Image (cartoon, grey):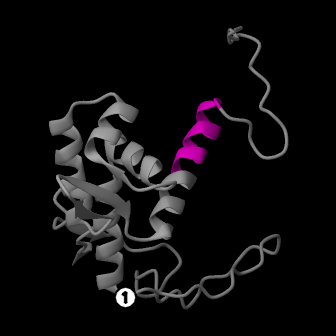
Amino acid sequence: MPAVSPDPLAGSTGSDPVEVAPVAGTASGHPDRAEEHVHSPERAAPGPVPVHDQQTLVEAGELLRALAAPVRIAIVLQLRTAERCVHELVEALGVTQPLISQHLRVLKSAGVVHGERHGREVVYRLVDEHLAHIVVDAATHAEEISGTRPRGRGARPAPENEETETA
């Protein structure tokens, strides 16, 4: 029977156990104990990669879950250039004020945004510039794989069976 290890990043609730099946070519069946593993001659062994502690991985997962909604991504993209109040976000994103406020609460509780009262309104800003990089990189990647943005140095040619839009 495979070993079971708790993984807070697995499943929808973040607390479901994950089965770890034995890994072929290892004496113990555990991927970290690959005593007999040999790379093919065409592939060099990868260099060492820093290992993060479990708490860091859990917090990173929680951050990514907080960012995992299109409206929250749009809010972060708006806040990356300047701080904004709720009515500015409503106008820019074309969604209702209650919806913007709900998503701002999620972002605030996750430590993504900070709100500061200025008279009758609260002005929101990103807590850290790293957060904008995460969202911008994710959006850029999504555009590249969907074909709405050129990849790398050259644009992706449209497949022959795909219609192209003209303005």
Q: Which residues are magenta?
A: 138-148
| Residue toward you, 90 or 12 | 90
Residue labelled with disc 1: 53
Majority secondary structure of the magenta segment? helix
Task: Let me know if residue 144 is in the magenta part.
Answer: yes
- Judge left or right: residue 2 versus residue 51: left
In this view, 7 is above or below 77? below
* Magenta stretch: includes residue 26: no
Secondary structure type for disc 1: loop
Residues packed near mark 1 inside 10 Å, few (<14), some (14 to 19) or many (20 plus): few
Q: Quadrant of the N terminus?
A: bottom left
Asked if residue 136 is positioned above or below residue 5 in the image, the reply reads: above
Residue closer to the observer: 7 or 140: 140
**Left or right: residue 66 compared with residue 30:** left
Identify the residue at horizontal 81%, vertical 75% (top origin): 41
Instruction: Give coordinates of residue 87: x percent, y percent.
Output: 28, 39
Q: Residue at x 80, y 33 (%)?
A: 155
Amino acid type at mark 1: Asp
Which quarter of the figure has residue 12?
bottom left
